[in-house]
Image: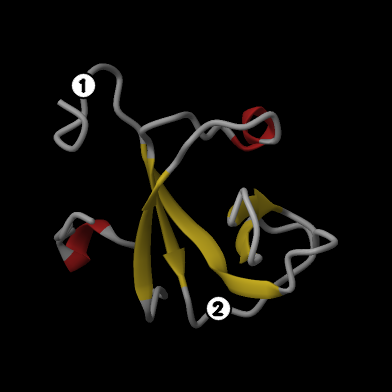
């Protein structure tokens, strides 16, 4: 687990409760422009909106999934994707 500090000035103004994930690429990611190692910032207080990219959780692997619609078996909506930080080369996290 990493402690990641992102200045508030760089985040969308409407984000209330940010959380950060390091993406691990799966087949569903290309539609959303997310690659392995990208930082995905979600707003955990944002409600799910069909057609807008969100993070979902279940109790088996893969635990987390990103989708713009509800996924069978992933009943917990963690939050809506608010921002993505993409690294072209080594990130400060994975060297």
Q: Count numbered badges in the picture.
A: 2
Residue 13 in view: no
Q: Secondary structure at mark 2?
A: loop
Task: Calculate the distance from the C-alpha at mark 1 to the C-alpha at mark 2.
Answer: 31 Å
Tell which residue pokes out farthest to the right in this image.
72
Q: Which residue is pictured at 80% across the width and 64% down the height?
A: 73
> Local crowd at mark 1 within 10 Å, few (<14), some, or many (≥20)?
few
Mark 1 highlights which residue?
A: 90
Tell which residue pokes out farthest to the front in this image.
60
Residue 36 image position (x, y, % from top left): 44, 30
Q: Which residue is pictured at 61% across the width and 48% down the height?
A: 62
> As displayed, is residue 66 above or below residue 74?
above
Q: Is residue 22 found left or right of 48 in the rendered image?
A: left
Q: Which residue is pictured at 45% across the width and 63% down the height?
A: 42
Residue 72 image position (x, y, % from top left): 85, 61
> As displayed, is residue 46 above or below residue 7?
below
Res 15 label: none
Q: Quadrant of the C terminus?
A: top left
Q: Secondary structure at mark 1?
A: loop
Q: Is residue 35 found left or right of 50 in the rendered image?
A: left
N-terminal of the pair, mark 1 or mark 2, is: 2
Q: Is residue 71 found left or right of 7 in the rendered image?
A: right
Mark 2 highlights which residue?
A: 46
Tell which residue pokes out farthest to the top in this image.
89
Q: Which residue is pictured at 21% across the width and 31% down the height?
A: 94
């Amino acid at each position: 687990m990493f402690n990641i500090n992102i200045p508030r000035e760089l985040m969308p103004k409407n984000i209330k409760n940010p959380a950060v994930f390091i993406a691990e690429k799966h087949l569903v990611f290309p539609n959303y422009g997310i690659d392995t190692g990208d930082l995905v910032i979600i707003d955990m207080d944002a409600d799910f909106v069909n057609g807008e990219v969100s993070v979902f959780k279940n109790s088996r692997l893969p635990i987390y999934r990103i989708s713009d619609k509800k996924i069978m078996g992933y009943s917990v909506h963690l939050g809506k994707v608010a921002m993505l930080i993409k690294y072209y080369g080594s990130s400060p996290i994975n060297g």
